[in-house]
Image (cartoon, rainbow, N blue to C red):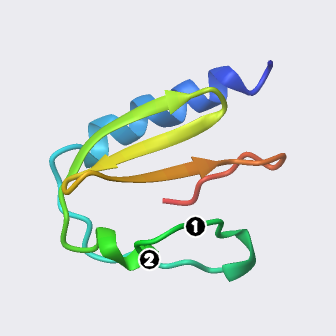
Amino acid sequence: MPELPDVEIYVDCLRRRIVGRVCQRVRLINPFVLRSVPPPLDAVEGKTIAGVDRLGKQIVLSVSGDLFVVIHLMVAGRLRW
């Protein structure tokens, strides 16, 4: 799985940048990439990012209030900060 080192780098960089910070806004550029269940994506706005982990090829953001944002980079594998 050649993409795993890339995912680990993203997780490490995100941990240093966002853990402990409050999510001010979520912007989804393309609604066709969202696969969600309740609550809606904007439920994480105003919540604190508690942790960043990897689950296989996915990046998992743990958010206060028992919420999780799971990001899969797909084939292109890019996350824009």
For residue 55, above or below residue 20: above
Left or right of residue 24: residue 59: right
| Residue 40, label in figure | 2
Q: Secondary structure at mark 2?
A: loop
Q: Identify the residue at the far front of this view.
A: 38
Q: Residue at x 42, y 31 (%)?
A: 53
Left or right of residue 60: residue 28: right
Query: For this rendering, which residue is in front, 57 or 80?
Result: 57
Left or right of residue 2: residue 59: left
| Residue 65, label in figure | none
The Cα–Cα distance between marks 1 and 2, rounded to whole angstroms, is 7 Å
Q: Quadrant of residue 4?
A: top right
Q: Residue at x 41, y 29 (%)?
A: 12
Left or right of residue 54: residue 32: right
Counting other residues with Cα less than 10 Å from the Cα at mark 1, is it few (<14), some (14-19), or many (20 or more)? Answer: few
Amino acid at circle 1: Ser
Q: Position of residue 67 (x, y in %)?
A: 32, 55
Q: Secondary structure at mark 1?
A: loop
Q: Position of residue 49 (x, y in %)?
A: 24, 51
The reply to whether discs 1 and 2 touch (Cβ–Cβ < 8 Å) is yes
For residue 61, above or below residue 28: above
Q: Residue at x 37, y 37 (%)?
A: 52
Amino acid at circle 2: Pro
Q: To which residue does mark 1 refer? A: 36
